[in-house]
Structure formats: structure tokens, C-alpha cells
């Protein structure tokens, strides 16, 4: 059976209330529930949405917030992360993290070298430095994935974990290269 035939079959099964009329399992094997407006079992790729992101955070007990623009964010190990749905239909997932400290502009060249070395050696995350209006340098990581054809709950969880964990590895490297002077005894 081809993939599209399988999807049609799955939709028919869901429309009938699931196998044997029982409720279908919810996101990531959690309590019995169906994703909002989806009506499909969790192993069928469905469109990305902010609601699915927040459901994943709730499922895993993560604290998150939704800002005034409707963007989802949270703190992981003291670092700010945002989870964006970009694209015409919100089909591109981007996990973007920012290191919790900043650099003086005089260190821009060496910070760019650290980012470029990382980017040359690894696929994820993309790292870069930005100079803000106040002249301070901020370091950011991004992992972006085009999910035009949908994403299963398991795949979504894997992508979120990858975005968070790979950025954390890079930020930990920055912590080692540039120790926080306030954390050391005088």
C-alpha cells in the first residue's frame, strides 16, 4: 500500500472513531486525546502548529510561555529559546536559542571565528553573532526544518530535542571558552 493510500485509510479509521471505536492515543503516547482539528493518529504526519508545540511542552512537563506576538518560548539551562512556525502555512519549524551572556564589540572577530569553526564542522545548529543597537554582541543558534508534508508527534519531539540539545552543546562550549567571571570566587 502506498503512503497516500495509507493516509486515506488512516483518515477513514479515525473518522470512524479509531480501531474498534476506542479513542486514539494523544500526542507522544500521552492520555487519550486527538490533536486540535487533526483527527488523525499520532503516527500520521500532520501540519505543524503552535498548539502542537505547546502540547509537546505540556506532555513533557516543560515550562513555556507565549509572548504578545503569539510566539512560544522558554528557558533551558538559563538560555532563552523560541520555537517558531514560519512559512506561508507555518510549515517551517525553527528552534532558536540565545546564549545567556553577551560579548563586548571588541571580541566580535574571535566570536565570529568560534561560530564559523562550529558551522564548518557541524550541521546543527547554525550559529551566528549579532551586534545589537547597544554595541553588545549576542550569540544565537538555529535549527530549522521544512515540514511542508507534516510531521508525526515522534518526529516533532525528535526535532525539538535536537534543536535544544545541539544548541546546548554549543552554548556549553562558549561557557568553557568564556567562563563567567561572576561565578568565580574573588
Image (cartoon, grey):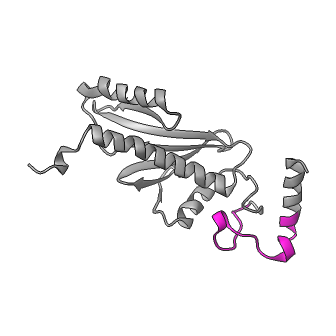
Q: Quadrant of residue 114?
A: top left
49 inside magenta stretch: no
Question: Among all residues in the image, which is located at the extreme left?
Answer: 186
23 inside magenta stretch: yes
Residue at the image point whose x is 11% and y is 51% from the top: 185
* Image x and y of residue 120, in percent: 47, 26
Majority SS type along the magenta span: loop
Residue 50 in view (yes/no): no
Q: Quadrant of residue 63?
A: bottom left
Question: Compared to 25, does 126 lie above or below?
Answer: above
Question: Among all residues in the image, which is located at the extreme top?
Answer: 109
- Relative side of 172 to 4, left or right: left
* Image x and y of residue 50, in percent: 60, 54
- Span shown in magenta: 13-37
Residue 173 in view (yes/no): yes
Residue at the image point whose x is 22% and y is 44% from the top: 180
- Relative side of 23 to 58, left or right: right
Question: Compared to 109, does 171 lie above or below?
Answer: below
Question: Compared to 76, does 110 lie above or below?
Answer: above
Question: Compared to 167, does 13 lie above or below?
Answer: below
Q: Nearer the viewer, residue 80 or 70?
A: 80
Residue at the image point whose x is 41% and y is 54% from the top: 76
Amino acid at each position: 500500500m502506498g503512503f497516500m493510500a495509507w493516509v486515506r485509510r488512516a483518515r477513514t479509521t479515525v473518522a470512524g472513531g479509531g480501531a474498534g471505536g476506542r479513542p486514539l492515543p494523544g500526542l507522544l503516547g500521552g492520555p487519550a486525546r486527538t490533536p486540535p482539528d487533526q483527527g488523525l493518529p499520532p503516527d500520521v504526519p500532520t501540519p505543524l502548529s503552535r498548539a502542537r508545540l505547546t502540547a509537546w511542552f505540556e506532555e513533557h512537563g516543560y515550562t513555556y510561555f507565549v509572548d504578545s506576538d503569539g510566539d512560544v518560548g522558554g528557558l533551558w539551562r538559563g538560555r532563552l529559546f523560541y520555537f517558531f512556525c514560519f512559512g506561508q502555512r507555518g510549515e517551517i519549524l525553527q528552534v532558536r536559542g540565545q546564549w545567556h551572556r553577551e560579548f563586548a564589540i571588541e571580541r566580535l572577530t574571535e566570536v565570529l571565528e568560534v561560530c564559523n569553526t562550529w558551522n564548518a564542522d557541524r550541521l546543527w545548529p547554525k550559529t551566528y553573532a549579532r551586534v545589537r543597537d547597544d554595541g553588545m554582541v549576542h550569540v544565537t543558534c538555529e535549527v530549522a526544518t521544512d515540514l511542508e508534508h507534516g510531521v508525526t508527534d515522534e518526529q516533532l519531539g525528535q526535532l525539538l530535542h535536537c534543536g535544544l540539545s545541539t544548541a546546548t552543546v554549543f552554548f556549553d562550549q562558549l561557557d568553557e571558552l568564556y567562563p563567567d567571571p561572576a561565578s568565580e570566587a574573588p
